[in-house]
Every structure is written in C-alpha cells, then in structure tokens.
Image (cartoon, rainbow, N blue to C red):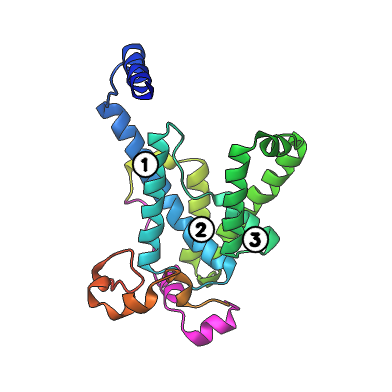
Amino acid sequence: METQLNAKSVFICLVRWGLPTVSVASFVGMMSAVFASTLESVGDYYACAHLSGAPPPPSHAFTRGLGVEGIGVFIAGMWGCLGVTSYSQNNGAISVTRVGNRRVIQWLSLILFLMAIVGKLAAIIASIPIPIIGGLLWITSGTIISIGVASLQHCNMNSSRTLAIFGTAIMTALIVPQYLTQNPEVIDTGTQEERGLMAYRKLDAETITKLGLRGSMTTYDLPFGMSYIKKWKWTRYIPFCPTFLKKD
C-alpha cells in the first residue's frame, strides 16, 4: 500500500510540475556562481588559517575543502535547498571571539540539527531582536574587511608598487570592475615575492614561532588513518590527501 502511494505521489508531481529540465543559460549562470564561490572559499581558507594561528593551508587542504563544498551543494540540490559554501562572516566571528577550535563547529552542527528537528529551539533563535542581529552583522562584516587588510602584513608596504596595487584594488572593486574585466592587461600586479605570497607560503619553524602561530602542518592532517596514509606511496598522487606532492 505504501509503495502504491509513493508511486502515485511521484506521478502527481510529474503531471503537475513536469520533468526536470536543464538549459544552457541556467548551467552557465550556476557555473559562474560556482567559480566565484570557489575563489571566495580559497580566500576564506587562508583567512581562517591566519586567524586560528595555523600555517598556510597546503594544496590538499584546499582540494579537500572545495570537494566537501561540492558534495554539500550536490546534496542541497537533491533536497531542493540552496547551495552551501564557506561563510566569510565565520572568520569575523573567530577574530572577535578568538575561538578557532574545530570542536566548536562540531557542537554547533549538532545544535543546528536539533533546531531543525525541534521547532521550539529554532523559535528561540528567531526571537532575537533585529537590532541585535544587525549589530552582530555590523561587527563581523567590519571585521572581515579588517582581516583582508591584515592579510597584507607580509607585503612590503614601503614599496610604491604595493601601495599602488592596494589602492587601485579598492577603487576598482568600488568603481570599475567591468572595465578591468574587459581590459585585464591594464594593471600589472607585480611579483609574488613583492606581494608577500612567497614569504607567507614558505614559513619555517622559527618564523612560525616568531609570528605567534601555534599550529603546525599536522593541523591539516585527516583525523584518522594518517599512520597508514603516510606508509602508502600511492596516496601522494591523490590531490586531497595530506601526503599529496604538488608539482610546481
């Protein structure tokens, strides 16, 4: 009887809404959003590592993070929900609270599950006055801007080229994004060394201690099975594996 009801429900949905369709316009639009979200996530990973006192994320951490986001988007699409991605405001929350422990996120996930099941718990959160929520967004959003500026601490800010790039980046983000899209060769961004990228990626143990970074590269290891992964040579060819060897 239950099988017949389920089949009948599916038939009614198909008659009412029709078969799922995919158009080129919707595909291109969604892929554009995916690429933009991917670039944002890469920046969020760097910012989160910096705020948490961890060293710069390796390539396998980026691959693993983006892969999990892709799985989340796929599941959300199957359930008819909005896509998921990294949330920049969380970096602002880390900066304000100075709490970057992954255990907090695990407990928060459990709380969100309970809120989805128990409506009264969700009602408590929904009852928070709008001015308070606005104040929280004000602080976290402002902190995000500060985090972006703080990421330039490894750059040579005495360099006229670096200052010109920093000022031009702000102005172009506010005024002429379309112009730069059509003319990408107008502004020379300089070398990676001058922009501080090389110094940040090649932090040795002494520099990590000097900068107050409490973590190590083991921060990006998987929570289980690392003893076997380090023994297996074939794992170095898997992009999301901590033993992945990036070819420059």
70 on left or right of 146:
left
Closer to us: 12 or 76? 12
Label 2 neighbour load within 10 Å: few <14, some 14-19, many 20+:
some
Q: Nearer the viewer, mark 3 or mark 1?
A: 1
Q: Is residue 152 visible?
A: no
Residue at the spot 36% in from the left edge and 12% down from the top edge: 16
Identify the image quadrant of residue 32: top left
Chain-order first, disc 3 or disc 1: 1
Residue that numbered label 3 is attached to: 95
Identify the image quadrant of residue 96: bottom right
96 on left or right of 60:
right
Q: Position of residue 119 (x, y in %)?
A: 65, 34
Label 2, label 3: how far apart the Cα atoms are: 22 Å
Residue that numbered label 1 is attached to: 74
Q: Position of residue 208 (x, y in %)?
A: 53, 81
Looking at the rendering, the stretch of residues picked out in magenta corresponds to: 185-213
